[in-house]
Amino acid sequence: MTAVPARRHEGLYFAIRNGKLLAGLVVLVPLIVLAVAGPMFVEGDPNAYVGIPASSPSAEHWFGTTMFGQDIFAQFLYGMRVTFVVGLLGGGLAAIIGMVIGFTAGYRGGLVDEVLNMLTNIVLVLPALAVLLIVNAYLGIRSVGVQALFIGLTSWPWAARAIRAQTFSLRSRDFVDLARLSGVRTWKIIVREIAPNMSSYLFMTFILLFGGSILIAASLDFIGLGPSQGVSLGLMLNNAARWSALHLGMWWWFVPPGAGITAIVGALYVTNVGLDEVFNPKLREL
């Protein structure tokens, strides 16, 4: 009964002493708060024309305005929220698919493993950009939800492979054999016996998928394949590039969204490295 609390205290002890983890959280937590609460303090539409076109940062418009007089700070706040939503939905869906396929293939083995591994390889080599072009051309659906769905359906293969390998190593353990001999159903063995022993690994996998989804969404928005309505950091970069902000010297138009994407993804990866050092005893001594 004391083993679990002891492990928790041990993990907390190393967590509050890990510089990478603390540095990542110091950057990530304020950005999350800004994304959640920031748009509440913005009045009206972030795409509304509210100021003098192409004005530099000032007390009235902290991040300046676009060529059309739109407040860049208001767009930045809304774009942060959309960026986190896409990352959460896309990364979450990819994590769920990866876990289902990885656990099933790793535990069942045999023909089931071969079929799921073949499916994983097919999705892995699938030209995701070409598929998205076809979807946009024939369906014409371009929304945050569809973008997150597409990212989730194409980002899970590497997670499934990693979880499959971990499951292979755990399925032959004594506690799994005991549960199997006791007549426990397969899904209960996976949920109650195998998954808890991989909880830290699964959490770090989700963080990587979260960051990857944000990067993919920003890239799609930047090249014009993302949602055409609303505001996102990638779409802000797309508009800045389309209207020659760099050539016109309007650095305040493209620096904030670029810095925001870099800060979010960078903080997520640094946090993941810190968590790896906390959860892995071999790395604590380094």
Image (cartoon, rainbow, N blue to C red):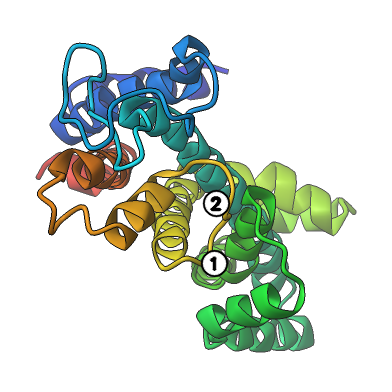
Q: Which mark is residue 165?
A: none
Secondary structure type for disc 1: loop
Residues tagged 2 and 1 counted as in contact (Cβ below 8 A): yes
Rendered residue at 55%/51% (across/down): 91
Q: Is residue 102 depicted above or below 191 in this figure?
A: below
Residue lying furthest front = 52
Rendered residue at 61%/46% (across/down): 89
Q: Is residue 223 left or right of residue 242?
A: right
Q: Position of residue 268 (x, y in %)?
A: 33, 42
Q: Position of residue 92 (x, y in %)?
A: 60, 48
Rendered residue at 39%/20% (across/down): 34
Q: How many marks?
A: 2
Amino acid beneath label 1:
Ser
Please name whichever residue, 98 or 183, is drawn nearer the observer in this view of the structure: 98
Q: Is residue 85 left or right of residue 258?
A: right
Q: Does the image show residue 99? A: no
As measured in the structure, the alpha-carbon distance from the residue carrying label 2 to the one carrying label 1 is: 8 Å
Amino acid beneath label 2:
Gly
Image quadrant occupied by the C terminus:
top left
Image quadrant occupied by the N terminus:
top right
Secondary structure type for disc 2: helix
Q: Position of residue 84 (x, y in %)?
A: 48, 38
Earlier sequence position, callout 2 versus callout 1: 2
Q: Which mark is residue 91?
A: 2
The residue under label 1 is: 155
